[in-house]
Image (spheres, rainbow, N blue to C red):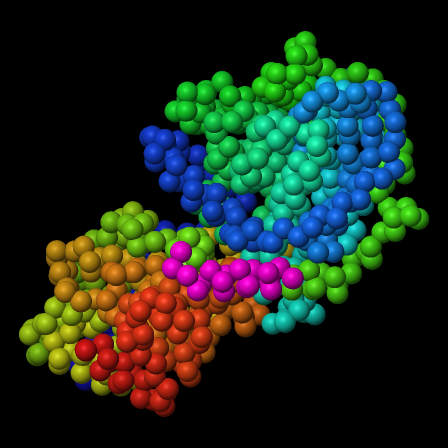
């Protein structure tokens, strides 16, 4: 009876003791505050920089980079203008995915000239857009624009000016805009509700849980288009590979910032009205799961240091940039001895824009750093823009692909899935591939390593003598991250220095049966001298979580929540790492200084233990994982407690488990072990360390308990 009472006390304690955990606070969203904290040294920054850059690449589905298939560029319809030419271009960034735009080239080129990547924002039909007369006159009156003719197409004005300055300019279309029609604007930029026909375990579409589980998203597609755009620009013989710039406003500013952060071929960056500690970009094409967890746009811009970088402020979310964000960027640039290489054009008196004043600032910045030799400041001249129909890529000789084709969407994502799977399976066959490609990605998915688990303290709340053992209940306080884990530890009075962390769906109650008594398998561990530790992982210990929290945004896009917050699966993995970190470093506590730390996970906790085991390395001596046959790739709800962005991409749960090799592993729920796991243990010469259980489910805990005592 006393054990049943203790069991009830544990349940009530679970609900009351974790109110201080920061993870109970409201979720962060794109309208939060995202400060950048400059590093204390370049060595510190080099390490941080690599982590943030990898986060961008993983989130965008570009880790590994998709195979660069032939661009098959088509350049046609040259238009001869005064001092420059305009051509129509389309190429394939991936098989069948066309990138469309215009190529502006100066006439009479001598030697190599700079190349400029020019991304546009969310204005509909942006590249082909003509400003209405009444709108333009107001802009001229307010000082935003200068000319009644040139101001009708600010995009052409910018490309023309750059061409007259001797630059080759590639201006391309956002997905779903102008001549980019294969994915609709409504899907790419206006997605609001999950599509049941695209939410399937095979042949899925964008925004589905399956796409998220494979890091397939619109932002990644647009980023790949930008990377392949650099490939195209540098394929032109007159372009100088040492002088490549990127610029764009609003959503184009996001594209510019991201491209500059991940592509070393960019030499100068000028993202406009986007670098800010405030709103991070509201469109589905500017967000992705995993992307801004623990980081933000100012830090993304910081990745470009110490190369020349300009930006601006306006009367929008960038209006505080002069005091919040830019000074910190200057501090970072100063560490490199290049403080003057970062520039802010203030314009808080203007609305959200890439207007003539800001464009002049870009031309002048480019002129200075690429040594073009023009009088400073550089300003545009008036001209007559081309009508939209003369700029359109598609015509009778160059017919457009099918618009908004769901079969194309499915086929495209299937190609990315197969391409990544092939690369990752090849990587899994070598220790170098696992070390350099798969493990770094898993660290991004989980959001924490054992080394980063933090400073953990123990707070005892109750200590009961149970005869042969002490039942100690308390809380682990992760002071670094502001998190709490409630635990109970059955500590033998004749301890042998071994601790088994026993985890299940019911939290600490996993140590006990329905009658409140210690489970037979756990009791056997304790009687053999091993301490048994149970824990309430986040939101365990009460009613089971059926759907995870999401931010207030009504659009059913996982990236709006999990682009800024860890998933529940990841947070529960953090809790396991907190426990292991404490056990390995604590000189006091329920079971101080253990010689052997083992972790066992049952039911939904099995995959969590697999993830923690992959990250904890030698800190977990023995791991017992009951997977129940779980796969991230079978989940059809991004609010499922087991959902993990990217979880299916990196060879799914077997890929996580394989990272455990060659350390001792007991595995159940898989039948015969998957080939990935077996191969990993063979490659690591650890086949004897892998024990696969294929018996009845009712016997699993007893069999694992026996193995854990070996």
Q: Is residue 326 left or right of residue 40?
A: right
Q: Is residue 448 left or right of residue 94?
A: left
Q: Please, which residue is most extreme toward the right here? A: 396
Q: Is residue 477 visible?
A: yes
Q: Position of residue 292 (x, y in %)?
A: 50, 46
Label count reads 0
Write the residue at 28% across / 67% down.
663
Front-lying residue, 196 or 157: 157
Front-lying residue, 699 or 84: 84
Task: Name the quadrant of the C terminus.
Answer: bottom left
Write the residue at 78% across / 57% down.
404
Q: Please, which residue is most extreme toward the left here? A: 494
- Location of residue 556 with respect to 340 vertically, above or below: below
Q: Position of residue 161 (x, y in %)?
A: 75, 21
Q: Is residue 151 visible?
A: no
Q: Quadrant of residue 124?
A: top right
Majority SS type along the magenta span: helix
Front-lying residue, 709 or 281: 709
Q: Position of residue 148 (x, y in %)?
A: 85, 20
Asked if residue 520 lies in the magenta stretch, the reply is: no
The stretch in magenta equals 415-432
Task: Name the quadrant of the N terminus.
Answer: bottom left
Write the residue at 43% across / 57% down.
433
- Location of residue 123 with respect to 671 vertically, above or below: above
Q: Quadrant of residue 45?
A: top left
Front-lying residue, 480 or 24: 480
Q: Is residue 67 left or right of residue 647?
A: right
Q: Position of residue 208 (x, y in %)?
A: 62, 63
Write the residue at 59% across / 39% down.
259
């Amino acid at each position: 009876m006393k054990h049943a009472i203790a069991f009830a006390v544990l349940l009530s304690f679970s609900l009351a003791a974790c109110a201080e955990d920061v993870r109970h606070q409201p979720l962060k969203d794109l309208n939060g505050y995202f400060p950048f904290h400059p590093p204390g040294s370049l060595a510190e920054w080099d390490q941080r920089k690599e982590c943030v850059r990898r986060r961008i690449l993983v989130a965008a589905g570009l880790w590994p980079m998709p195979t660069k298939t032939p661009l098959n560029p088509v350049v046609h319809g040259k238009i001869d203008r005064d001092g420059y030419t305009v051509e129509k271009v389309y190429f394939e960034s991936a098989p069948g995915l066309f990138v469309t735009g215009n190529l502006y080239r100066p006439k009479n080129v001598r030697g190599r000239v700079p190349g400029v990547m020019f991304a546009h924002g969310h204005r509909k039909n942006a590249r082909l857009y003509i400003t209405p007369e009444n709108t333009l006159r107001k802009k001229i009156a307010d000082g935003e624009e200068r000319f009644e003719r040139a101001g009708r197409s600010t995009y052409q004005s910018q490309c023309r000016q750059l061409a007259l300055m001797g630059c080759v300019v590639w201006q391309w279309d956002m997905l779903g805009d102008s001549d980019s029609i294969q994915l609709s604007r409504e899907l790419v930029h206006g997605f609001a509700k999950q599509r049941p026909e695209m939410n399937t375990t095979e042949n899925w579409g964008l925004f589905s849980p399956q796409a998220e589980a494979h890091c397939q998203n619109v932002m990644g597609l647009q980023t790949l288009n930008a990377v392949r755009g650099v490939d195209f620009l540098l394929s032109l013989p007159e372009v100088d590979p040492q002088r490549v710039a990127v610029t764009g406003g609003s959503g184009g500013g996001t594209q510019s910032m991201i491209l500059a952060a991940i592509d070393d071929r960019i030499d100068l960056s000028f993202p406009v009205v986007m670098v800010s500690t405030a709103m991070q970009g509201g469109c589905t094409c500017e967000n992705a799961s995993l992307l801004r967890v623990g980081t933000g746009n100012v830090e993304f811009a910081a990745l470009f240091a110490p190369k020349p970088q300009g930006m601006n402020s306006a009367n929008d979310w960038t209006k505080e940039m002069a005091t919040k964000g830019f000074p910190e960027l200057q501090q970072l640039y100063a560490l490199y001895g290049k403080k003057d290489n970062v520039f802010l054009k203030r314009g808080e008196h203007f609305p959200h824009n890439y207007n003539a004043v800001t464009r002049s600032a870009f031309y002048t910045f480019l002129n200075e750093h690429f040594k073009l030799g023009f009088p400073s400041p550089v300003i545009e001249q008036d001209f007559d823009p081309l009508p939209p129909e003369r700029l359109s890529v598609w015509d009778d000789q160059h017919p457009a692909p099918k618009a908004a084709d769901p079969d194309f969407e499915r086929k495209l994502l299937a190609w990315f899935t197969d391409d990544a799977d092939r690369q990752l399976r090849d990587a899994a066959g070598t220790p170098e591939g696992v070390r350099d490609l798969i493990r770094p990605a898993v660290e991004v998915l989980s959001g924490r390593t054992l080394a980063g688990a933090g400073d953990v303290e123990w707070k005892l709340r109750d200590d009961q003598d149970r005869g042969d053992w002490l039942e100690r209940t308390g809380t682990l306080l992760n002071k670094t991250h502001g998190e709490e884990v409630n635990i109970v530890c059955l500590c033998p009075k004749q301890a042998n220095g071994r601790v088994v962390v026993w985890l299940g769906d019911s939290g600490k109650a996993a140590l006990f049966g329905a009658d409140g008594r210690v489970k037979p398998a756990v009791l056997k561990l304790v009687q053999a001298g091993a301490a048994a530790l149970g824990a309430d992982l986040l939101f365990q210990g009460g009613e089971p979580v059926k759907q995870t929290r999401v931010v207030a945004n009504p659009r059913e896009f996982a990236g709006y929540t999990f682009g800024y917050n860890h998933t529940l699966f990841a947070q529960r993995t953090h809790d396991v790492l907190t426990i292991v970190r404490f056990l390995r470093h604590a000189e006091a506590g329920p079971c101080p200084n253990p010689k052997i730390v083992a972790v066992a996970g049952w039911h939904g906790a099995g995959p969590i233990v697999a993830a923690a085991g992959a990250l904890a390395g030698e800190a977990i001596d023995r791991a017992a994982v009951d997977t129940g046959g779980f796969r991230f790739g079978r989940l059809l709800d991004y609010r499922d407690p087991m959902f993990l962005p990217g979880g299916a991409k990196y060879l799914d749960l077997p890929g996580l488990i394989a990272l455990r090799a060659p350390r001792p592993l007991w595995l159940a729920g898989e039948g015969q072990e998957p080939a990935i796991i077996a191969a990993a243990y063979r490659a690591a010469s650890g086949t004897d360390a892998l024990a696969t259980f294929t018996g009845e489910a009712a016997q699993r805990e007893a069999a694992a308990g026996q193995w854990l005592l070996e």
